[in-house]
Amino acid sequence: MSSEVMFWSGSIVMVAIALFFLLPPLLGRGKTVGVARRETNLTIFQQRLEELKDDRESGEISSEQFEQAEADLKRELLADLEGEEHKVEQNSSAGRVGALIAIVLVPLIAFGIYGKIGAPEAINVKVASASAQQQQSTKNFEDVVAQLEKKLEQNPDNSEGWMMLAKSYEVLGRNSEIVNVYERAIEKMGESVDSQLFMEYGEALATRNGGSWMGKPVDQLTRALDIDPTNRDALWISGHAYFDLGKYEKALGFWERLANTAPTDDPEIVNMINEAAYEAQEQLGREKTALLKLVAVPAGTVLTVAVALDQSLQEMVSAEDVVFIYAKAQGKKGPPLAAQRLTVASLPTTIQLDDTMAMIASNNLSSADQIVVGAKVSKSGVATGGSGDLVGTVETTTSQTDTIKLVINQIVE
């Protein structure tokens, strides 16, 4: 490992360990992330993948080692991207590690920008100076790792801590000891070992075996999924493990299970799962079939409205009568902020109103606060309606997150 790589790698993991000590609430629960983190993770993924390709071409690693490392990278990227999904529960331990990694990546990007536009000469020092810096950085890093080990001896039930220790050993080049870290963790934690730790233990075993998942490594993935059958990291890596073992049907099965719980509004995740499935389907001689389809999520304000027709008015309508469901700004005239057209035959129903349904783009739900949500059975079939139409309205706000219940129960005179 070069002095510069050692310096930056050590710095990054030391930041991670510092956060481990200082921010237990962060490590205690999953977090969501924004667009900046997504872009950062994708950039880092691409950079690391290019480095792996260079190492393979130069002969520093074998093709088997490259495939194992590539699978690990994709699994980590999948876990990080899933942190952004909306209203979908994260795997708790994966989410905590993902949140920690997100914060660690910030200094990495900062260092990279500094090296390009700041003072590069301060980084590209003479060889002798770099060597001295490496020695000092290594010593400092080893001291921090020793503190982490001591903390784990006092609190051995901390799964995230053991996984962080294993990553620290990797930075220090102590690869032969990584498996031992997980085995110590499993011994000390007993029945409290979680799904994520078993999964990472399996990865470490496979890496030690030159990328082979045969036997004990793949058994750890089974243990991980026995504890948490919905662990997306474990489902993803299990698919790759069985694919590498030539068991393409089982590999596809794991990716199908993953697709059942994966977010469908994230193009990166959708593409990654589909591409993996295509490879298995090709090996099985089947037509390529996507497991997931990208579903766009409306941006801006979204209101959920449950609409029903009062029983006393049922005989006054026919199934073909037009129903307009709309939202207007309170006390203001003009076109609705959002509207949908249905028929009486579809009632009762639950629909969504969002910014894409505005008649004028700038005059949408997000542009208002206090609103009136209404529904009208129009005898004439036009939105303006007239005498004899049936209506129902409710006053609310655009910040409403609960379902708005709307009953058509009045007759227009």
Image (spheres, rainbow, N blue to C red):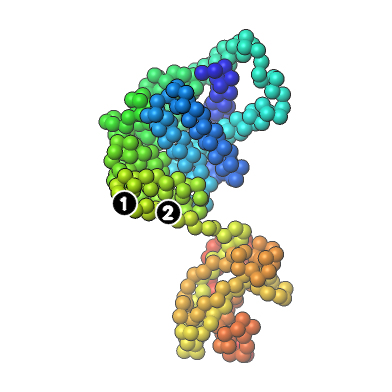
Return the mark for residue 292: 2
User: Could you say where residue 297 lies in the image, as x and y percent from the top left?
Assistant: 54, 58
User: Could you say where residue 80 lies in the image, as x and y percent from the top left?
Assistant: 50, 40
Residue at x-position 46% and y-position 26%: 57
Per the model, the C-alpha gap separating discs 1 and 2 is 17 Å
User: Could you say where residue 143 lies in the image, as x and y percent from the top left?
Assistant: 53, 16
Image position of 386 with respect to 83: above or below: below
Image position of 250 with respect to 116: above or below: below
Residue at x-position 60% and y-position 30%: 108
Circle 1: residue type: Arg
Circle 2: residue type: Leu
User: Could you say where residue 365 lies in the image, as x and y percent from the top left?
Assistant: 64, 65
Residue at x-position 42% and y-position 54%: 292
Residue at disc 2, secondary structure: loop
The mark total stands at: 2
Residue at disc 1, secondary structure: loop
Category of crowding for the residue at label 2, using alpha-carbon neighbours closer than 10 angstroms: few (below 14), some (14–19), many (at least 20):
many
Residue at x-position 72% and y-position 24%: 119
Image position of 344 with respect to 285: above or below: below
Res 148 seen here = no
Return the mark for residue 286: 1
Res 57 seen here = yes
| Front position in the image: 197 or 156 | 197
The disc, 1 or 2, on the residue closer to the chain's N-terminal end is: 1
**In this rendering, which labeled residue sits more in front, label 1 or label 2?**
1
Is the Cβ of the residue at disc 1 closer than 8 Å to that at disc 2? Answer: no
Query: Which image quadrant is residue 199 in?
Result: top left
